[in-house]
Image (spheres, rainbow, N blue to C red):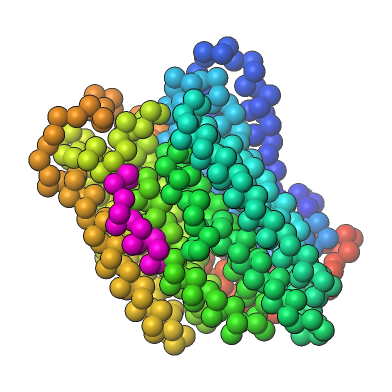
Amino acid sequence: MSPNVLALLPEYILTLTGIVIMLADPIFPAAHARKPLGWLAILGTLASGLAAWYQLGFGTIHGFFGTVQVDAFSVFFHLLIAAVVLVTLLSSLDYFETHANVTGEYYALTLFGATGMMLMTCSVELLMVFVGLEISSISTYILAGFRKGQSTSSESSIKYFLLGSFATAFFLYGIALAFGATGTTRIDALAHGLTTTATPTLALLSLALIIIGLGFKVSAAPFQVWTPDVYQGAPAPVVGLMSTAPKAAAFAVLLRILFSGFPTYEPRWAALIWIIAALSMFVGNLGALLQRDVKRLLAYSSIAHAGYLLVAYTAFPADGIASACFYTAAYAAMNVGAFTVITQLGGYDERARTIDDYTGLALKRPVLAATLAFFLLSLIGIPFTGGFFGKFYVFSAALHSGNVWLAVIGLFNSGIACFYYLRLLAALYTRPVQDTEHIDVSTPVTIPAAIALTFTAVATLLLGIAPNRILGLAQRSADVTMQPATPTLQPAATETVSTTSTR
């Protein structure tokens, strides 16, 4: 198989599946359900994940003149993104049941967005990263406004598009300045260029602009202003997707750029990340204390978790990269699981919005209530959950590198977070039952949604009690990211696939 095909095999599968869905969608009558297209999207996502696992056996794959590098690091995030997209599709099969004429577009856009996210994680050329970022962003801009006829959904999409485009401009300007300072946009060549640059101030400015652009994508403070409004207006399954998969891709890019591209500037960017991490934790947790809308509450929670994850960036590379990878996986499992429960409870019209709407849920829908409670406990960081081990790993890495105060700030913010998570838990189990029609108690959970909930719950549990497999892959990702830079550009004729199996 050609190295160029092998390097982007998961992306090819997702793209072709999305194109087939778009071509098949007009064949269905307007009012006819598009579930077959949904199952096709699910099969395409599964095939993409299997292709990513297949890539793991080839070691490091270079393609497209060295602009794409597939290794343990990129495969880790490919598998994570495929898993999130799979859960999102399973939970969405019945979400648009009464709006069948738009469902085909939804499935195709989800796959195209995942293609861009995967491309970001395996690109070692900043312009290729930008292409992947745009593919991902355009898809999510549209998906955020997919609840047709809802003013909040339209507002969500427009706000996300305007602010997202503004942030993307920062990232693009950062790329241009990096080229001006070093003469290259290759991530693995930036480190060499920085040692000989005559304009170090320009290089620092480029790094600052890149951090601003990616900070918007991961909802880190002070670039988080879009998050609550967009999460509140977007469809629940879309929020579950956009709160995890695009963030995972952006965090992966940030890891490569900081640890591989700008290692000589680590004392400077580590101080900036320190401030952003602390600010994100405080803004997210204090903002969540004031929320009654569950989606806005989880939006502020995502800001806080971005801060927790950024703590890992201030640690030594070996610990920081591995702990960041693991925390990304743990957060994805528990957060997409929580939004899957919200999707099942609220439906397309999102009848259950505020904490009061969840009053007495344990008596009405005991299984869903218990599942949501488990995800909330993991978000708090209770032992035997993925959230606990993720925070333990991140804070331990910070302590090991001497960032004691940042670890203390993280622990203090974890205590603050208990208040708003436990307030929602109290609504599920301890408050008096009120007569309400917001939650439909007669409609059972569909089989695809049950599979999605089971998958996320089991993943959250295993990441807390048996994390060795994911932890091992995360540590291998760290080893790959810390390898010495190889700035020499490979010609097309010498593009290679490593034949040493690393499985």
How far across and down, in percent of the image, does residue 270 sit?
Answer: 55, 79
192 or 6: nearer the viewer? 192
Position of residue 436 in the picture relative to residue 221 (left or right): left
Q: Is residue 404 visible?
A: yes
Q: Quadrant of residue 55?
A: bottom right
Residue at 24% x, 60% y: name it. 419
Quarter of the picture containing the C terminus is bottom right
Residue sitting at the far left: 432
Q: Find residue 193 and report its image quarter.
A: bottom right
Q: Residue at x 24, y 37 (%)?
A: 357
- Give residue 161's position: percent from left, percent from top: 60, 44
Viewer-closest of 17 and 148: 148
Q: Position of residue 280 (x, y in %)?
A: 44, 66
Instruction: Identify the residue at horizontal 31%, vertical 67% (top origin).
Output: 414
Residue range corresponding to the magenta coloring? 281-294
Nearest the eye: 48 or 407 = 407
Q: Is residue 52 visible to us here?
A: no
Magenta span main SS: helix
Q: Position of residue 295 (x, y in %)?
A: 37, 45
Q: Residue 304 vs residue 19: left or right?
A: left
Looking at this view, name the residue that lies furthest to the bottom. Answer: 402
Q: Residue at x 39, y 84 (%)?
A: 404
